[in-house]
Amino acid sequence: MPRGPVSGPADSPRGRVRLARGVSPWLAPTAAAAAVTAVLTRRSPRWALAAAPLAALTGGMLWFFRDPERAPGEGRLISPADGVVQSIDPWPDGRTRVAIFMSPLNVHVNRAPAAGTITSVEHVPGGFVPAFNKDSDKNERVVWHFDTALGDIEMVQIAGAVARRIVPYLFAGAKVVQGERVGLIRFGSRVDLYLPEGIAPAVTVGTRTVAGVTRIDNV
């Protein structure tokens, strides 16, 4: 995965970290299986062959599904996702698309890029090719539109080869503050943010972003 400069502060070491909403269907059975096999190892050491990987998997999922509290960043548009800016492309209608690639090690909770009202949340069926592939534009995705002080802002959550479930937290008609949690993509994937015409990006390809913190628009 490409690496680059970090734009925006990291999570505060004293910040509270919770688990993301919508992870129970994945985490609960794995944690339960780990607990049961751990108990069974007292009866037979052979159960350790199952208990050890299940415990490791549970620990990994706790890390993957972390949801840290963050102080919001400054800017008219802030990053909706943790990850790395994969591409910045001019769009035919004058907007600029900023694509942020999320690896399985990133926080998977996405946040509102600006304050406003959610005007639509549309689920679009599609494939599951890797999110860094050019054909991922045809992947399963959820398209968000926000009515903001800058006008209509479009954000797209794109599923990848591993991330096959997008969980919206809010729906059309809801009012959001900038940096508010709006949804989850389980495991890695991509989030695209479309900057309105006339707004230049403050990030470059390779910039690492922090959801709710990194400024995306140039002053």
Image (cartoon, helix red, strand yellow):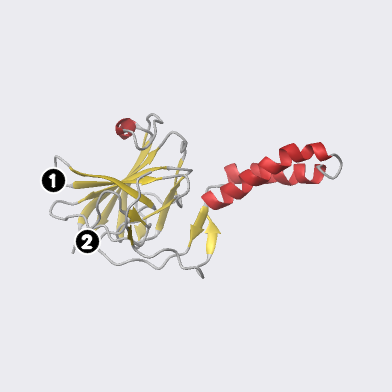
* Residue kind at label 2, given as amino acid type: Ala
| Residues packed near mark 2 inside 10 Å, few (<14), some (14 to 19) or many (20 plus) | few
Nearest the viewer among 16 and 2 is 2
Identify the element where label 2 is drawn: loop
Quarter placement of the N terminus: top left
Can residue 20 be seen from the camera position used here? Answer: no
**Is residue 207 shown above or below 36?**
below
**Residue 24 at x, y percent in the picture:** 59, 47
The reply, left or right, for residue 23 in relation to residue 192 is right
Mark found first going from the N terminus, 2 or 1: 1
| Badge 2 vs badge 1, beta-carbon distance below 8 Å | no
**Residue 39 at x, y percent in the picture:** 80, 46
**Is residue 148 shown above or below 71?**
above
Residue at figure coordinates x 70%, y 44% from the top left: 34
Quarter placement of the C terminus: bottom left
**Residue 41 at x, y percent in the picture:** 81, 43
Q: Which residue was labeled with disc 1?
A: 94
* Residue kind at label 1, given as amino acid type: Gly
Nearest the viewer among 94 and 54 is 54
- The image's mark for residue 164 is none
The reply, left or right, for residue 87 in relation to residue 132 is left
Q: CA distance from mark 2 to mark 1?
A: 18 Å
Asked where in the image residue 192 lies, by quadrant, the reply is top left
| Residues packed near mark 1 inside 10 Å, few (<14), some (14 to 19) or many (20 plus) | few
- The image's mark for residue 149 is 2
